Image (cartoon, rainbow, N blue to C red):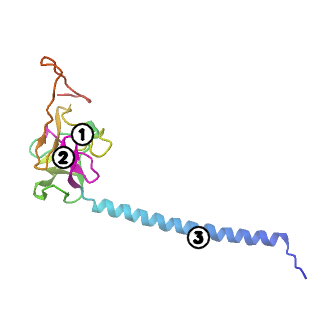
Amino acid sequence: MQTTSHPKEGVFEDVAWSRRIATMVAAALAVVGILAASSIARSATQSSATVSLHKTSLGMVLATANGHTLYLFLKDTNDKSACTASCAKFWPPLITRSKPTAGMGVKASLLGTTKRSNGSLQVTYNRHPLYAFSLDKLAGLTKGEGLAAFGAKWYVLSGKGTAIVKAVTSPSPTTTTTQCLYPPCG
């Protein structure tokens, strides 16, 4: 004997099952969201900048943990940054919330911090505030080397904390060139 069910009974069962699945998916997404938010909050409060030596076309230079080259700004004096506002957009300062970490080839005794005008802590090396360059899109690039921008020149740093000055060769003894990407140029 074969039983037949009312066509609407299966529909109600399918709707109930769909609601249960939707509830389980929503609960799982909520848990993932909570875990992601707590992970972001943890990393924000525990963030420490790591400075290491990385190989570039200029040799071994200071770089961030992900290999982006770091620069010093000749306009900085007395361990204080002179790069703010639009300067800091093109030359983002290396910021930390805690003591910076010395990576491979870096002397921990030369690492420090200085307070910026906005209250954040900028990493220093051998008393030079450190900056990245916005046009160095990939690790190992040194496009900011020797540029004159925002009133002074920018140089990469060696593991000793001194500027690496790339020798500029001119096409002829009477020709000089100045490279300036962003005003004001000095």
Q: Which residues are magenta?
A: 50-76
Where on the picture, by quarter, is residue 96? bottom left
* Amino acid type at image mark 1: Thr
Q: Which residue is mark 1?
A: 142
> Distance from label 1 to label 2 (Cα)?
9 Å
Residue 17, numbered label: none
How packed mark 2 is, by other alpha carbons closer than 10 Å (few <14, some 14-19, many 20 or more), is many
Up-down: is 168 above or below 111?
above
> Distance from label 3 to label 2 (Cα)?
51 Å
Of marks 1 and 3, the one in the foreground: 1
Identified at 29% across, 46% down, the residue is 139
Identified at 22% across, 60% down, the residue is 98
Q: Position of residue 58 (x, y in %)?
A: 19, 40
* Magenta region includes residue 69: yes
N-terminal of the pair, mark 3 or mark 2, is 3
Q: Position of residue 169 (x, y in %)?
A: 16, 27
Q: Which residue is mark 2?
A: 61
* Amino acid type at image mark 2: Val
Residue 24, numbered label: 3
102 sits left or right of 38 in the view = left
> Which residue ends up furthest to the bottom in the rendered image?
1
Contact (CB < 8 A) between labels 1 and 2? yes
Up-down: is 124 above or below 11?
above
N-terminal of the pair, mark 1 or mark 2, is 2
Identified at 15% across, 50% down, the residue is 124
- Element under disc 1: loop
- Element under disc 3: helix
